[in-house]
Every structure is written in C-alpha cells, then in structure tokens.
Amino acid sequence: MRKILVATFVSLDGVMQAPGGPSEDPTGGFSFGGWTAPHFDEAVGGAMGEIFARPFDLLLGRKTYDIFAAHWPFVADPSDPIAGMFNQVTKYVASRSRPTLSWRNSEWLGEDVLASLRTLKAGEGPDLMVQGSSELMQTLWKHGLVDELAVLIFPVILGKGKRLFGGEVAPTGLRLTRAKTYSTGVIVANYEPSGPVQIGDFQLAEPSEAEVERRRALT
C-alpha cells in the first residue's frame, strides 16, 4: 500500500506560495517570491535530501506541475540531485480537465481525482510525494488522504499568500514524529495524523467535601 506524503515550505504564518523565486507564482499580487532562499544552506539542503531519500512518485496540482515542467527538464547540471529525481519519477497530475503534459513520465489522474488516488494508494509502488499544490493539498486533507506531513518552517512572516491550510480545513490532531532546528532559523517538523482533536480544561476543579473539611481544619 502506498502513502501520500506532503513536503512543503511554509512561513511562520503558514504561507507556502512561491518559495523558490520572484517569478514562480505572483498570483494575487504576491511579491515575496523566493522567500526561502536567504535561509537555505547546505544543512537545510541535507534535510531536503532526507525527505527525498525514500522512493517516491510526484503528486502535483496543475499549477505546480506547470511551474515544475517549465524548470526541471531544462536544468543543465547533470549532477543536480533534485532535477535527476524529478525528471525520472512518475508525475501524477490533478486537473479538472485533461491537460497537455509535456514533461516525460507524466500522467493525468482523470476526472475523478479522489477515486484515482484511492486506487493508487491501495496498489503497489513508491509513495506519492506532494510538492506545492496548495489547492490539491486542501482536497487531500479534507478527505483524510494525507499519511505524513514534513513542514520546513522558515523564520519569516509574509502576511498574505496561498496557505498550507485554508479556512475550511478539516480539524485533525497530529503526532510529532521528528523535529530539528537549523542555524539559519529553519525548523523541520514531521507529523502524522493522529485522529480527532483532543481538548481539555485548565479550570480548577471544585474541591471534594473531604478537601473542604481539611482546609477548614487548617484555618
């Protein structure tokens, strides 16, 4: 059985839009494209390498697919590890209508994305890695299809932009499986869904009759 893994960059206030560069995704007038770059060093790159170390195929929304397809196939450096992986693996694309997929090893998930994903998850093969794809991420979370979440939290507040979790996200408890901080201020946190949100109450409980009598005896 295959898992769906989400690996994403977010600002401290939860924005995930255009982490890689100014022209990546200016939708909505977003002007902070490339906000991860000043905080990315060899150690943070190593954390990304750990995320990509296990076999995976890519699971992408249409907009993210178009951004990736315009970049990764044209990386000229043959030693670039990300380009080598991304160009080789299968890319499953969620799109409302049949898209033209020019990047090799790309497949449309069809009109019923959820049915296709459930079939993929039930089958054999590498896990499915979500990159970017904010709208797809909302759908996956809403229908309980995310198995693991790797969040790279960067020390910036962006104020506006596409967010990892939208306003209609399904409430879910999370279990922290791993966390590590880096000298550039980046925090890498790994989570797994753990069921419904648990709540409690910090209000002081009413004392028992015995406790009331004990307090009276001391006064």
Image: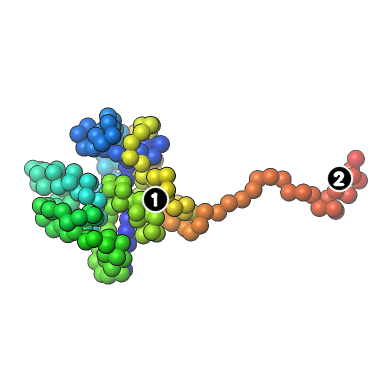
Which color scheme does this rendered protein use? rainbow
Question: In the rendered image, is residue 52 in sight?
Answer: no
Kindly identify which numbered label has been placed on residue 219: none
> Circle 2 is placed at which residue position?
215
- Is 53 placed above or below 116 here? above
Q: Determine the secondary structure under disc 1.
A: strand
Q: Determine the secondary structure under disc 2.
A: helix
> Which residue lies at the image location 20% right of the left edge and 55% below the top edge?
97
> Which residue lies at the image location 27% right of the left edge and 62% below the top edge?
112
Q: Quadrant of the N terminus?
A: bottom left
**Percent coordinates x, y for residue 22 in the rendering:** 22, 32
**Percent coordinates x, y for residue 165 in the rendering:** 39, 46
Q: Quadrant of the C terminus?
A: top right
- In this view, the residue in front, 11 or 28, is 28
**Percent coordinates x, y for residue 29 in the rendering:** 27, 31
- In this view, the residue in front, 54 or 151, is 151
Q: CA distance from mark 2 to mark 1?
A: 47 Å
Q: Is there a contact, CB below 8 Å, between mark 2 and mark 1?
A: no
Question: The residue under label 1 is which amino acid type?
Answer: Asn
Q: Which tag, 2 or 1, sits closer to the chain's start?
A: 1
Q: Quadrant of residue 202?
A: top right
- In this view, the residue in front, 181 or 37, is 37
Q: Residues within 10 Å of mark 2 (few under 14, many from 20)?
A: few
> Circle 1 is placed at which residue position?
190
Q: Quadrant of residue 31?
A: top left
Question: The residue under label 2 is which amino acid type?
Answer: Arg
